[in-house]
């Protein structure tokens, strides 16, 4: 792999599509990632579960279709009380299912194209179809920005 971001690859153990929303959220937070790839029982990549998908599980479906929610006055605590059972639901119903997994031989241009054309914040990396790492959009951006801008350490000085 000849890529500028190879040093930003993050090795991970993917989530399982049977994991609960609560378990998945805890693992994502512990990893410090915006989301994680998800595999089925056979270990095949089936999607991504992250911040956006968590909100889709928590908030009622109509929230995503409204042009404005100004007329809804519920507090987040009221919402959580009404939807706290979502923590027990399997994440398989909330995945982003764009096929964005790439093999270890990916190129920087391939990653850029995927970030530009798909609504994902990370791209899973697989060896022989088995997901083992991710590249985040923010890590990719940072590496490219450091190459075209003055070193980021000098910003703000």
Image (cartoon, rainbow, N blue to C red):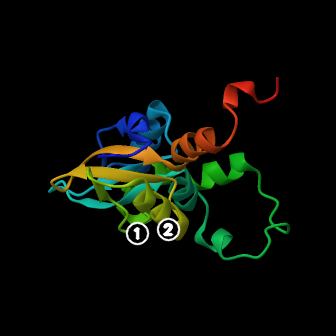
Name the image quarter holding residue 150.
top right
List x then y, in percent, for residue 127. 19, 49
**What secondary structure is marked by label 1?**
loop
Earlier in the chain: of badge 2 and badge 1, it is 1
Q: Is residue 150 above or below residue 74?
A: above
List x then y, in percent, for residue 47. 36, 61
Residue in the foreground of this view, choosing between 35 and 21: 35
Residue holding disc 1: 98
Please identify the residue farthest to the right as the structure is shown: 70
- Which residue is found at the position 50% from the left and 34% from the top? 32
Q: Label 1: how many residues lie within 10 Å, few (<14), some (14-19) or many (20+)?
A: few
Whether pointer 2 and pointer 1 mark residues with C-beta atoms closer than 8 Å, the reply is yes
For the C terminus, the image quarter is top right
Q: Is residue 81 left or right of residue 125?
A: right
- Which residue is found at the position 31% from the left and 50% from the top? 125
Give the distance between the C-alpha atoms of the residues marked 2 and 1, in whole angstroms: 7 Å
> Which is in the foreground here, disc 2 or disc 1?
2
Residue in the foreground of this view, choosing between 34 and 15: 34
Q: Is residue 80 left or right of residue 33?
A: right
List x then y, in percent, for residue 109. 44, 59
Residue in the foreground of this view, choosing between 21 and 118: 118
Residue holding disc 2: 118
């Amino acid at each position: 792999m000849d890529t500028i971001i190879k040093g930003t690859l993050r090795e991970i153990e993917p989530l399982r599509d049977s994991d609960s929303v609560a378990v998945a959220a805890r693992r994502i937070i512990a990893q410090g990632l915006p989301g994680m790839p998800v595999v089925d029982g056979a270990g095949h990549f089936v999607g991504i579960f992250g911040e956006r998908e968590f909100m889709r599980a928590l908030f009622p479906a109509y929230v995503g279709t409204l042009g404005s929610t100004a007329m809804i006055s519920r507090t987040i605590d009221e919402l959580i009380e009404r939807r706290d059972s979502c923590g027990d639901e399997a994440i398989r119903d909330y995945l982003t299912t764009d096929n964005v997994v790439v093999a270890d031989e990916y190129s920087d241009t391939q990653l850029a194209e995927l970030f530009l054309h798909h609504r994902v914040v990370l791209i899973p990396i697989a060896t022989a179809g088995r997901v083992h790492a991710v590249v985040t959009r923010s890590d990719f951006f940072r590496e490219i920005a450091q190459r075209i801008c003055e070193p980021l350490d000098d910003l703000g000085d």
